[in-house]
Amino acid sequence: MSYENILNENKDGICYITINRPKQLNALNGATILELNKAITKANNDNSIRCIILTGSEAKAFVAGADIKEFAAFDKKDGENLARQGQKLLFDLLENATTPSIAAINGFALGGGLELAMACHIRIASDNAKMGLPEVSLGVIPGYGGTQRLAHLVGKGKAMEMITTAGMLSAEEAQQWGLVNHVCSQDELIPMAEKIASKIKHNSPKAISKAIKAVNAGFTDGINGFEVEISEFGSCFETPEFIEGTTAFMEKRKANF
Ligand code: CAA
């Protein structure tokens, strides 16, 4: 499949998706969101893909936000549509994908860019990265899930400060705040993501997908995460991967999933 706004390559069980609108600092316009939807859906339906790595092509930007030029003339209804469609097509899709994703944040991750990284399951950042939700400086609020996911990740108090000040965190501060798991040099960013992906690749994809579902359930209104965990735990026992995992343990060998 050919794309105009993203680069997409599969190698050794990893799907690499690179947002590629360098002149606009990889801002997310509607077309890019649709392409990301296609690439993520495809990777998620492909059993040979065990991890998705998402990054930005422009040396100084992961994604500088939703495309401001595209929504500058919107009214209330258009605004609601943009947020609802975007959340459904990309951000919720990514968070609920059964294939784990790693955001490799290589520069500015602002507004929709940080929201995209927060919808991934794991975040790592290079030491030049800057992260923030500057929407209130434009007279809007985060619309791609930022008010919710930021508070989940860093706590309500810190989320309130980041959102109301429209300030940016350095990579180091983001790590201290629990927003990213690891910080490294720019050169080490993709190798570090690959190192995490290679650990993921050794484990049961079915069990990983059930674990993602159970963790996400705890952050979903009206759903009891413990109950989802019990049910997903039980359903593991009818998978061939459970038989392989436990048999391999008993036979003192590595499981082959
Ligand atoms: N949308 C559209 N275009 C953008 C953009 C965005 N979010 N961010 C950067 N660009 C464009 C700039 O307009 C500029 O294009 P032109 O050369 O055609 O003018 C180009 O990318 C380079 O940007 P700058 O010249 O501004 O680069 P800089 O190094 O001086 O500054 C920056 C970098 C601090 C990231 C600055 O570009 C910036 O503040 N960008 C906007 C960040 C922002 O507010 N993001 C939130 C968007 S709103 C949102 O995301 C809503 C939502 O939740 C749904």
Image (spheres, helix red, strand yellow):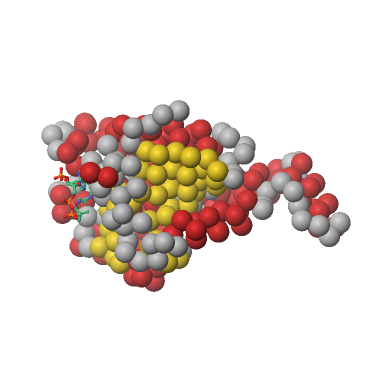
Taking the spot 35% from the left edge, 49% from the top edge, the residue there is 56
Indicate the position of residue 130 as horizontal and vertical percent values: 29, 61
Which residue of the protein is positioned furthest toward the front in this rendering? 187
Answer with left or right where residue 77 lies relative to residue 207. Answer: left
Taking the spot 43% from the left edge, 52% from the top edge, the residue there is 103
Q: Residue 54, can we see it? A: yes
Indicate the position of residue 72 as horizontal and vertical percent values: 14, 38
Indicate the position of residue 176 as horizontal and vertical percent values: 39, 71
Taking the spot 17% from the left edge, 39% from the top edge, the residue there is 69
> Height in image: 186 above or below 233?
below
Q: Quadrant of the N terminus?
A: top left
Taking the spot 81% from the left edge, 57% from the top edge, the residue there is 253
> Height in image: 30 above or below 248?
above
Which residue of the protein is positioned furthest toward the top in this rendering? 1
Answer with left or right where residue 213 lies relative to residue 254. Answer: left
Indicate the position of residue 158 as horizontal and vertical percent values: 32, 66
Q: Residue 50, can we see it? A: no
> Height in image: 91 above or below 104?
above
Answer with left or right where residue 32 lies relative to residue 42. Answer: left
Q: 147 or 111, which is in the foreground?
A: 111
How many numbered markers are drawn?
Answer: 0
